[in-house]
């Protein structure tokens, strides 16, 4: 006679009983009584839920109870393991926001380790023995990069804006460039607007009122900065005259927001940065650009056009540029602000700067990344290396991995008695496109070769889920009922990991 639900519940041991189980007592000594008790409660709660939903009969419950100590140990290992884990990005999205954007250069990791395991001179001047500024560790490298590459075709640096109540910089002071770091680009925009336009108006085109990831909108950031938004033009067409007509005695700043995560095509018009810079200079106003991604190398070298870099904006006469460290720069999450030294000094003196500044780990990672640029070692920066991979290079790796997958799965099928040539998992190659991602170069694509996977017994979504359960998880994409793997964003050493796992699901 089948056991009643009440009888099944009565068969469950108590938490105290399991704490005394010989197999688990040693885990309590190693991992702590509280952690073990939590793991036991979690396992028992799952069993209670299954009993309540009639998913366990007496026989299946007995089997579960026999393996209860092992289940508790698995739960304990899971609860005490890291939640933040490395994954294999096989999506072909180079700056995948959900996967942590830019992976760091190995030199960045080495520098973090060296400086984090000991004390450092983060804010200590070794020459004078006095307190120093943390900015210098990266600002010196930015200055070197801009000095080395800023001469060709670049206009001379402007004089700082005249010493009015709005700007407070002497007209005859010829500025140098300076760079400061905050925790992300949204923070950089907030700090710049609050420092330069608090209580005044900022003029921006209606076609540039963008929303970035996580539902953060430029108008909302501007509102928090205590500056007033003054919209000009229309969504698709804004002229330099629109900016000029909107200037009043309350205007503090002209703002250009780069449409980094979308494109407007068709009947459109937008003033050039040079036109805006000339207007700003004529009306004695600073011009700021929220560049978003911000590249320090020529994107045309990897086949990406119409995506401005930081140097392009500075050459055009922009006074202050904000951009991200973990996008096209290829460094850690940070917000970078580069511009005329006098304006940057005003931002640095704002009390918000201290609230938004970054720690020694970010400075270490950013310094190492910038040093790779200074040395011209772009291959050391993972995202630059990925962008430069040719379709043929990716195809060569994909062919090897595809042949391995099909060979292993065919052998596995024969061993299980399946018809020869009819493996459960089939891999084939097809043409495709990689994307930059991370809100950068929205219309740019890079040609690639994809591995398309079809499983006889699993849907594409189910196979994708199985890949995410691998160790490390493999993140792919699904299109046309197939799982697609793009090796552009897979490190070569990870090819064998993918091959081994796919052999296990054949």
Image: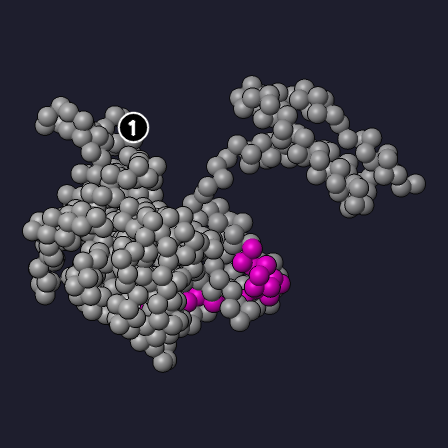
- The residue indicated by pointer 1 is 117
- The residue depicted at 30 percent of the width and 37 percent of the height is 351
Q: Is residue 416 left or right of residue 2?
A: left
- The residue depicted at 88 percent of the width and 39 percent of the height is 4
- The residue depicted at 57 percent of the width and 24 percent of the height is 27
- The residue depicted at 33 percent of the width and 56 percent of the height is 201
Is 109 or 214 nearer to us in this picture? 214
Q: Where is residue 247 in the image (x, y as percent from the top left)?
A: 27, 63
Which quadrant of the structure image shows residue 346?
top left
Q: Please, what secondary structure does the residue beneath circle 1 have? A: loop
Quarter of the picture holding the N terminus: top right
Magenta stretch? Answer: 445-465
Q: Position of residue 322 (x, y in %)?
A: 28, 53
Is residue 389 in view from this perspective?
Answer: no
Is 457 or 36 nearer to us in this picture? 36
Is residue 500 inside the magenta stretch? no
Is residue 74 in view from this perspective?
Answer: yes
Q: In this view, does 435 lie to the left or right of 69?
A: left
Which quadrant of the structure image shows residue 31?
top right
Relative to 287, say whether 15 is above or below.
above
- Neighbourhood count class around disc 1 (C-alpha, 10 Å): few under 14, some 14–19, many 20 upward: few
């Amino acid at each position: 006679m089948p056991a009643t639900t009440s009888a099944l519940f009565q068969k469950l041991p108590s938490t105290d009983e399991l704490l005394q189980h010989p197999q688990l007592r040693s885990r309590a000594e190693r991992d702590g009584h509280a952690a073990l008790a939590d793991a036991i409660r979690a396992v028992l709660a799952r069993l209670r839920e299954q009993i309540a939903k009639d998913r366990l009969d007496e026989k299946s419950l007995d089997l579960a109870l026999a393996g209860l100590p092992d289940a508790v140990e698995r739960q304990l290992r899971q609860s005490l393991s890291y939640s933040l884990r490395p994954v294999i990005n096989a999506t072909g999205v180079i700056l995948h926001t959900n996967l942590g954007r830019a992976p760091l250069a190995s030199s960045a990791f080495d520098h973090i380790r060296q400086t984090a395991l000991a004390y450092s001179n983060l804010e200590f001047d070794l020459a004078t023995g006095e307190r120093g500024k943390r900015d210098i560790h990266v600002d010196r490298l930015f200055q070197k990069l801009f000095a080395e590459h800023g001469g060709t075709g670049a206009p001379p640096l402007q004089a700082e804006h005249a010493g009015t109540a709005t700007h407070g910089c002497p007209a005859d002071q010829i500025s140098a460039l300076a760079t400061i770091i905050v925790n992300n680009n949204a923070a950089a925009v907030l700090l710049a607007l609050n420092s330069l336009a608090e209580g005044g108006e900022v003029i921006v085109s209606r076609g540039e009122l963008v929303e970035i990831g996580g539902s953060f909108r430029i108008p909302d950031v501007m509102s928090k900065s205590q500056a007033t938004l003054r919209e000009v033009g229309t969504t698709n067409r804004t002229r330099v005259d629109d900016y000029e007509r909107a200037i009043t005695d309350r205007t503090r700043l002209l703002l250009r927001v780069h449409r980094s995560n979308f494109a407007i095509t068709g009947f459109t018009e937008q003033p050039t940065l040079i036109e805006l810079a000339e207007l700003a200079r004529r009306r004695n106003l600073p011009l700021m650009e929220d560049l978003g991604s911000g590249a320090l190398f020529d994107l045309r070298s990897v086949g990406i056009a119409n995506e401005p870099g930081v140097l392009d904006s500075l050459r055009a006469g922009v006074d202050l540029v904000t951009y991200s460290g973990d996008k096209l720069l290829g460094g850690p999450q940070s917000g970078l602000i580069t511009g005329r030294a006098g304006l940057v000094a005003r931002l640095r003196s704002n009390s918000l700067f201290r609230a938004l500044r970054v720690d020694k780990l970010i400075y270490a990672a950013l310094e190492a990344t910038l040093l790779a640029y200074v040395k011209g070692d772009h291959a050391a920066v993972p995202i630059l290396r990925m962008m430069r991979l040719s379709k043929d290079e990716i195809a060569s790796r994909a062919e090897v991995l595809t042949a391995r997958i099909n060979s292993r799965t065919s052998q596995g099928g024969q061993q299980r008695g399946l018809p020869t040539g009819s493996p459960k998992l089939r891999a084939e190659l097809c043409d495709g496109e990689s994307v930059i991602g991370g809100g950068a170069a929205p219309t740019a694509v890079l040609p690639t070769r994809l591995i398309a996977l079809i499983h006889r017994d699993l849907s594409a979504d189910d196979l994708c889920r199985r890949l995410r359960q691998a160790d490390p998880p493999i993140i792919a994409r699904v299109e046309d009922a197939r799982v697609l793997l793009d090796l552009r964003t897979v490190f070569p050493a990870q090819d064998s990991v993918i091959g081994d796992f796919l052999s296990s699901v054949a």
